[in-house]
Image (cartoon, rainbow, N blue to C red):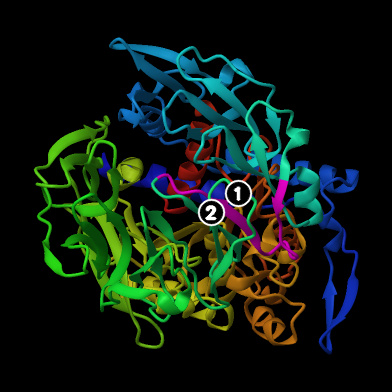
Amino acid sequence: MKKLFYLLTISFFSAHAQTKFRPPATTVLPVIDTLHGVLLTDNYRWLEDKTDPKVIEWTKAQHDYGIQYLSSTQKTHEGLKQDITNYIDLDYEGPLNKEGKRVFQTIKRKGDKQNKLYTILNGRQVLIWDPVKLDTSGNTSTQGIAYSYDGERAAISVQKSGAEISTTYIVDTKTGKILYPPLENIFGYQWTKDQQHAYFTIRTQEEVNKQLPLKTYLWKVGDPASKAIFTGTTNDAKNSFYIYDNRYSDVSFYGEGDFYSNTVHLFKTGTKDTGTLIYESKKSNAYPEAIDDKLYIFTNDNAPNYRLMVADKSNPGYKNWKTLIPENETVMQGYVVTKHNIIIQDKKDIQSRLTLYDFDGNKIKQLELPEVGNVAGIGYDREEDSVYLTLNTFTSTPKTFVASANDFKWRLYYQRILPVDMSNIVGEIKFYYSKDSTKVPAFVVHRKDVQMDGNNPVLLTAYGGFQAGIQPHFYGFYASLINRGVIVVEAGIRGGDEYGEKWHANGMLDKKQNCFDDFNSCAEWLIKENYTNARKIVAIGGSNGGLLMGAIATQRPDLYKAIVCEVPLLDMLRYDKFLIARYWIPEYGTADSAKDFRWLLRYSPYQNIRKGVNMPTMLVTAGANDTRVDPMNAKKFVAAAQNNDGQISPVILHMDYNSGHGSGQRTEQLIDNWNFVFEFILNQLEL
């Protein structure tokens, strides 16, 4: 019987392997540029105009052919879609969220297209917000909720089809009544301290398309939006203007910054005072919090592992800042100032802990956690004097505990139970060495009965950018793959925050190649340690991780069986000319600079497709409504790969016409999209 199954399996994959990949032809229309003395030919510049009927036609033809090809060459895995459905589409009641004297809860019932918001009144759950009432298709989703301090009103922002262009509604949280006409194109709504006004930024699709600096306003709640008072902007769309009040003090802050540095002005809350410049840096950042007469500043200024500083609001200038909790060998992740003490969250080799200090910065003790787990985050309710702590593990759903900030007697506050079988799954933290001998962490999650025979299927992923590092988390979403024998590996490559700002800095700008080397070294380590072999590794990554996927495809095609490259940045010489990508110049650089151009040209995937070299089979996805990464990146790369004479393995373009960068998908859409990706992965791993 086993022999018959083996023969049938071999016959299936052999037959389907004979189906040739013949995508729709792509016209070559060369555009020749001379950039910093280098002559460059861009054969697919014409695909950048998403409004061009020819581009629309080409995109749909590519997308339709990709679906047709995969449908005719892939087998369907029994139970896979049901596993994904069981994880995503089920009854869900979130933790109780206290705002002022009010209590709220996010609830989603099986079959609901989007989450709904309820309030608790007299012990009853009362529905106050359902985005499906705005759009019965389910394509409109709640993007954010900003509650007033007393909880009596909420500013609820929605987006359509993942476009991240918002409409904001001010809602009475007892009745769900919409109080005023909706605010269109609002970004970053914040209530002021008096709760009668709000700060918001206008972001229209036109401004995104034209890469215009965004403008921030002060609005009297209830007035026509046209009466809002201009507060500030920037000179360049790569920077952001910010402003915020402090609930527990009478000073406010505003300034300008990019991803990693900023200026800070302090002014008296509720006035039109231009304020005092108290901080300015081009290399580091500081965003103060004011409590009573003190400023608390969490910063990486002269402290790549971060430190907590303090100042008096009467002498707020940088020269008067004092170190309260100094930088350490571990990475400081955050802090909470309670009425009794200060809690510091830091991490060593990926794992987080909590330490208690007094107001003079003296260490009291390391806080004992309620059970074994990684600290995912802490929060503090000053009105209640309660600390909330969330713990993560690889194989159990997150648990949130609550305790008084005075005695830290923890009790379980919330845990969501999911119908996922993790009983035969184990997660480990491992370390390997990269090309330059740098020690890199990785999570390896697999079945307990895995055999180290060098033949296990592996799904390898990473991000590696923007200080976004890995931390232990629940892997239940991948249980369907893992229980089928797949080893899931997440590498903590440089560019993240695993070891502080130095780790990030060594994976950005001219050091970006380290990210790609770290990832490829992980694949080599998995092979060396007999987890797997190069014919059994599928890589997956999105956004900045999609750039990573493009780089490994062009640099080390020999290491991977297939690659899933989602909403990617791939043309790094032109990425910053589109949508909001100017924000990312501090991370990558720009080809407008001769210095930056040199390193971008060396690794940019679109420009480094090697003639005559076959890359692994690739599924390249893009969102038609993406306002972050322009789909032109995916389109141009796919076109160039398909027209490369040496490309034998399929390179497939898949467009999500009802989504953007990934957020806000309705339930059915989310299930279908992940089933599509998981089917591709399992088929490529020949499972």
Local crowd size for mark 1, using a 10 Å CA cut-off: few (<14), some (14–19), many (≥20):
few
Write the residue at 50% across / 44% down: 677
Displayed quadrant of residue 131: top right
- On residue 268, the disc is 2
The x and y percentages for residue 391 are 22, 48
Q: Is residue 239 magenta-colored?
A: yes
Q: Amino acid at mark 2?
A: Lys
Q: Which residues are magenta?
A: 230-247
Q: Is residue 491 left or right of residue 345?
A: right
Q: Residues within 10 Å of mark 2 (few under 14, many from 20)?
A: some
- Tell me, for residue 271, which label it has, or none: 1
Cβ atoms at labels 1 and 2 below 8 Å apart: yes
Can the viewer see residue 65 in this picture? no
Compared across the picture, whether 502 is left or right of 159 comes to left
Q: Is residue 233 left or right of residue 271?
A: right
Q: CA distance from mark 1 to mark 2?
A: 6 Å
Q: Amino acid at mark 1?
A: Thr
Give x and y (percent) for residue 239: 66, 63
Up/down of 90 relative to 440, above or below: above
In this picture, is 178 found above or below 329?
A: above
